[in-house]
């Protein structure tokens, strides 16, 4: 890919990533850990970040793109400020996670994987958080909410937003 | 250290925290302080207890009383009645599920609190995992000390594990001692120990209980494994979703290093072994050992073609032993008590215990550890408390998504490697999902096949294409568009996948498919025939 097409700004975010890469450069197989860090800094992995990682680690961009798209955890699209993950694992499925998911999508007016217009929420699905006793479960960022009904889930995301706005 | 006449344990996991365990703990301490007994009663935060769906659980020792669904308000009654007067507090409000269930269990004989032969989970929810001194006092690192002090050779360690008959708990059931021996004998200047903690099987969280409830046991076992095979470096590959586990393991690693139990010159014996945590990025296939190794190397987690096996060509093509969390957690007890003791548990060909996750429509969902060979019926009824709300049992999905649907005719099957194999079933991850009469097997199979279609890594064609075709057929059946011959088609595709797929992901899809069709054919035929009847009607 043409280098000139990407402008890598010299800002705090890139400096933080660079520092992490420097520290982990000599550990074997650092790519996934570096991408974890990059996503925690930028929120997602746009082409310029992938390019930056590529030149810093001296790994072909194609290989990085391959890794990014292979794992569920990595995103190439910008996301909302908070991510709602509804579990669709077997235990949650039995307990009705599907209706919860549909209700949330309807409430937010987006499809699964989409981001709300105000960029506050992104809604996505995941497979089993290992909290099956609470099924059906959703996770907002890293906080687990369990034993959901459609209404309860809607109330939670409303309250969550309200709490942050205040 | 002051003397304490009572201990109150608060198991702390994500479920407990969500239900307000931290507030309960704060209030409890306040109440104890108010009554001036804060020095007599110790409040301990422990790892998860394995009881699900019962809110905040408190366990009072030495009385061994379990309180369920405790709210901050209840702490007053518990302190004033139980702690001060020695009376079990019966008035704890049923705050969570509101089903009027009595939430005080007197002794350990009901449901999940029934006595269990705990080998793997012996310290879970009994010790404070953040206090390494307490862990050591409870026998933590004793097996490692025994090996180093009595100068037991690596060969003897391997011999003992081989004699114990310990088999891998990740699903395949390969003898652990053999794996270690192959790795020891493999040529190479550098060797590795990998702990597979990429627990992604839907409906399973047994490894999580060990990671969070007794992290030191895992570290100890890995050091022993390293000593036995001649490795200096170990990796724990934990799935990214288990942030709490990652934090606790990292904390345990730091503590162990402070006590010279890990790192360089362990216990001043010249033994070196270091452990590093690697965070996964969400791919089911990475539970397969060669895919996990690829992922550890920072690549796409696609399985390698075997042979060569990881024991000779693993991480960076060096000899590597890959063991599941639960497998490793058995090791210290075997070293301490001997292989003969271990063989007194379980069956001839599957010795020891197994941790099961019992979920779904049961009265007491949660985790239990029982001897290998315990009948499924006993697990569901005696430990799980039977089917919830008096409904009829319909099926149990045993072994996770890559598991089998068992009908009530097979309830007496003994849960060990051999007996399950006879019924074309597997132990798998130890997940038992109980379904009542209202559950549609077609829906369940749809959910499972959707999962496989999503998680197929796409490397080999039988799996990539097969999972997609299976999903299309089951969707057709589910939506009332099924055709005659669909069931045979599904079976044929799944069989082809079993024979030709590269890794266990594609190979094992046959299990849920064939067992669902064999044991619950009516469910499918009903859907398919409904459509055919309709056609006749419109013709």
Image (tube, coloured by chain):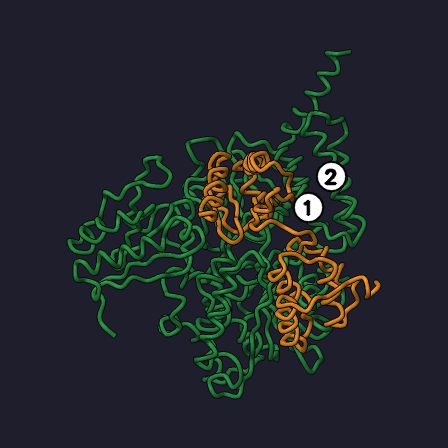
Chain colours: A orange, B green
Task: List the residue tagged with mark 1.
Answer: B452
* Front in this rendered view, residue A45 or B125: A45
Report how far apart the C-alphas of labels 2 and 1 lie in the structure: 10 Å
| Residue A88, position as x, y percentages in the image | 59, 43
Determine the secondary structure under disc 1: helix
Number of other residues with Cα within 10 Å of mark 2, as a class: few under 14, some 14 to 19, many 20 or more: many
Identify the residue at horizontal 63%, vertical 27% (top origin).
B522
Q: Quadrant of residue B321?
A: bottom right
* Front in this rendered view, residue A150 or B442: A150
Q: Chain of mark 1?
A: B
Number of other residues with Cα within 10 Å of mark 1, as a class: few under 14, some 14 to 19, many 20 or more: many
| Residue B147, position as x, y percentages in the image | 48, 80
Left or right side of B267 for B496: right
Do the CB atoms of the residues marked 2 and 1 lie less than 8 Å apart? yes
* Mark carried by residue A44: none
Task: List the residue tagged with mark 2.
Answer: B470
- Of the residues under marks 2 and 1, which one precedes in the sequence? 1
| Residue B170, position as x, y percentages in the image | 59, 58
Identify the residue at horizontal 45%, vertical 40% (top origin).
B362
Determine the secondary structure under disc 2: helix
Q: Is residue B399 visible?
A: no
* Front in this rendered view, residue B536 or B342: B536
| Residue B72, position as x, y percentages in the image | 29, 49
Q: Quadrant of the N terminus of chain B?
A: bottom left
* Front in this rendered view, residue B90 or B433: B90
Q: Is residue B499 visible?
A: yes
Q: Chain of mark 2?
A: B
């Amino acid at each position: 890919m043409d280098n000139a097409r990407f402008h890598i700004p010299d800002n705090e975010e890139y400096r933080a990533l660079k520092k992490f890469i420097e520290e982990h450069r000599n550990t074997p197989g650092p790519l996934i850990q570096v991408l974890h860090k990059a996503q925690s800094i930028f929120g997602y992995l746009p082409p310029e970040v992938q390019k930056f990682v590529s030149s810093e680690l001296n790994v072909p961009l194609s290989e990085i793109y391959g890794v990014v798209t292979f794992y569920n955890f990595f995103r190439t699209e910008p996301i909302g400020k908070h991510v709602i993950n509804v579990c669709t694992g077997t235990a949650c499925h039995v307990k009705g996670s599907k209706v919860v998911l549909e209700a949330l999508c309807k409430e937010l007016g987006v499809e699964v994987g989409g981001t709300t217009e105000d960029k506050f929420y992104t809604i996505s699905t995941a497979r089993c958080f290992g909290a099956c006793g609470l099924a059906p479960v959703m996770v907002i960022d890293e906080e687990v909410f369990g034993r959901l009904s459609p209404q309860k889930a809607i109330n939670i995301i409303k309250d969550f937003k309200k709490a942050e706005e205040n | 250290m002051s003397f304490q006449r009572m201990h109150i344990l608060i198991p702390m996991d994500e479920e407990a925290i969500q239900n307000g365990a931290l507030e309960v703990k704060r209030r409890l301490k306040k109440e104890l302080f108010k009554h001036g007994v804060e020095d007599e009663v110790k409040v301990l935060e422990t790892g998860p207890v394995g009881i699900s769906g019962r809110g905040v659980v408190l366990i009072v020792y030495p009385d061994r009383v379990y309180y369920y669904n405790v709210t901050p308000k209840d702490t007053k009654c518990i302190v004033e009645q139980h702690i001060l007067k020695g009376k079990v507090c019966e008035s704890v409000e049923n705050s969570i599920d509101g089903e009027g269930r009595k939430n005080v269990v007197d002794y350990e004989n009901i449901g999940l609190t029934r006595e269990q032969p705990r080998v793997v989970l012996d310290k879970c929810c009994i010790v404070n995992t953040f206090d390494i001194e307490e862990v050591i006092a409870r026998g933590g690192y004793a097996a490692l000390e025994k090996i180093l002090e009595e100068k037991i050779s690596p060969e003897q360690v391997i011999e003992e594990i081989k004699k114990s008959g310990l088999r891998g708990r990740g699903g395949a059931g390969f003898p652990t001692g053999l794996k270690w021996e192959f790795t020891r004998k493999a040529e190479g200047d550098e060797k590795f120990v990998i702990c597979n903690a990429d627990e992604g099987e839907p409906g399973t969280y047994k490894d999580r209980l060990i990671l969070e409830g007794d992290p030191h046991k895992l570290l100890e076992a890995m050091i022993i494994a390293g000593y036995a095979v001649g490795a200096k470096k170990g990796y724990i590959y934990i799935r990214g979703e288990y942030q709490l586990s990652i934090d606790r393991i990292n904390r345990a690693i730091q503590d162990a290093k402070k006590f010279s139990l890990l790192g360089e010159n362990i216990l001043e014996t010249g033994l070196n072994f270091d452990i590093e945590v690697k965070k996964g990025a969400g791919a089911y296939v990475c539970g397969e050992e060669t895919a996990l190794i690829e992922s550890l190397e920072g690549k796409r987690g696609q399985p390698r073609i075997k042979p060569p096996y990881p024991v000779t060509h693993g991480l960076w093509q060096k000899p590597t032993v890959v063991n599941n969390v639960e497998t490793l957690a058995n090791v210290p007890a075997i070293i301490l008590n001997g292989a003969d003791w271990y063989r007194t548990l379980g069956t001839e060909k599957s010795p020891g215990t197994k941790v099961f996750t019992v979920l779904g429509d049961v009265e007491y969902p949660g985790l239990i550890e029982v001897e290998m060979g315990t009948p499924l019926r006993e697990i569901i009824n005696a430990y799980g408390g039977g089917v919830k709300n008096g409904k009829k049992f319909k099926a149990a999905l045993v072994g996770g998504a890559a598991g089998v649907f068992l009908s009530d005719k097979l309830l007496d099957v003994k849960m060990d490697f051999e007996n399950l194999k006879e019924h074309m079933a597997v132990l798998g991850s130890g997940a038992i999902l109980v379904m009542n009469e209202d559950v549609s097997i077609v829906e369940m199979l749809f959910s499972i096949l959707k999962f496989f279609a999503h998680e197929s890594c796409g490397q080999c064609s039988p799996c990539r294409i097969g999972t997609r075709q299976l999903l299309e057929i089951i969707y057709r059946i589910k939506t009332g568009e099924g055709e005659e011959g669909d069931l045979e088609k599904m079976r044929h595709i799944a069989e082809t996948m079993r024979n030709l797929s590269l890794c266990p992901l594609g190979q094992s899809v046959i299990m849920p498919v064939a067992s669902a069709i064999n044991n619950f054919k009516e469910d499918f035929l009903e859907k398919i025939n409904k459509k055919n009847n309709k056609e006749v009607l419109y013709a």
